[in-house]
Image: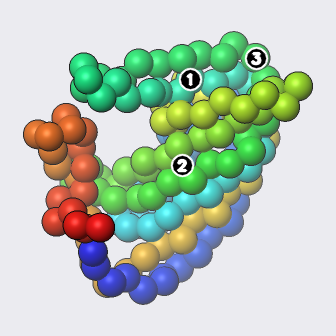
Amino acid sequence: MMEVRIGRSFMGRLAHGVDLLEALNRAVRERGIRLGRVEAIGAVQKARLGYYDQERQVYAYIEWPRPLEITSLLGNISLKEGQPFVHAHLTLSDERGMVFGGHLSPGTPVFAGEFFIQELEGASLTRGFDATTGLPLWELSPFPG
């Protein structure tokens, strides 16, 4: 565990048709945000989300080829391969209120979206390969809980 301080905050609107993950990554890279958190709401034209198969240690992807509401996007920003990287999970709902969720992946074009990014200061976190999980996790000692 490490202590951080709240830095700059940004709010913005996402352009219609942009890829949700690519647009958020572009926003943090253009502003030099190396550590932070991200939230978003809105709607997508279609969605592609990942689910991590813990046994096989690979992502499986599910696609929804229809409009959906973003009920919640929560994520963090750290460094991966030396670049700012958004890691986010997305919860979506359909016209009947059924909810779907998973790991935000490229291939999710925005219909309309608004985001909030909060920079954190006082430390830097880099993602590196974790042999136990097969995931690129923060290079930080795990909290024993």
Left or right: where does residue 2 sit relative to residue 28? left
* First along the sequence among labels 3 and 1: 1
Contact between labelled residues 2 and 3, with CB atoms less than 8 Å apart = no
Residue farthest to the front, as pictured: 145
Task: Judge left or right: residue 4 versus residue 96.
Answer: left
* Residue occupied by mark 2: 24
Q: Nearer the viewer, mark 1 or mark 2?
A: 1
For disc 3, the marked residue is 66
**In the depicted view, which residue is nearer to us: 38 or 33?**
38
From the viewer's side, name the closer residue of 80 and 50.
Answer: 50
Q: Is residue 30 visible?
A: no
Report helix, strand or loop for mark 3: loop
**Residue denoted by label 1:** 48
Identify whether 108 is placed above or below 82.
Answer: above
Q: Quadrant of residue 64?
A: top right
Q: Nearer the viewer, residue 34 or 93?
A: 93
Q: Which mark is residue 9?
A: none
Considering the image in quadrants, where does the C terminus appear?
Answer: bottom left
The amino acid marked with disc number 3 is: Arg
The coloring applied to the image is rainbow
Q: Secondary structure at mark 2?
A: helix
Task: Using the numbered discs, state the Cα–Cα distance from disc 3 to disc 1 in whole angstroms.
Answer: 11 Å
**Which residue lies at the image location 27% right of the left edge and 74% below the top edge?**
1
Q: Is residue 115 left or right of residue 33?
A: right
Q: CA distance from mark 3 to mark 2?
A: 21 Å
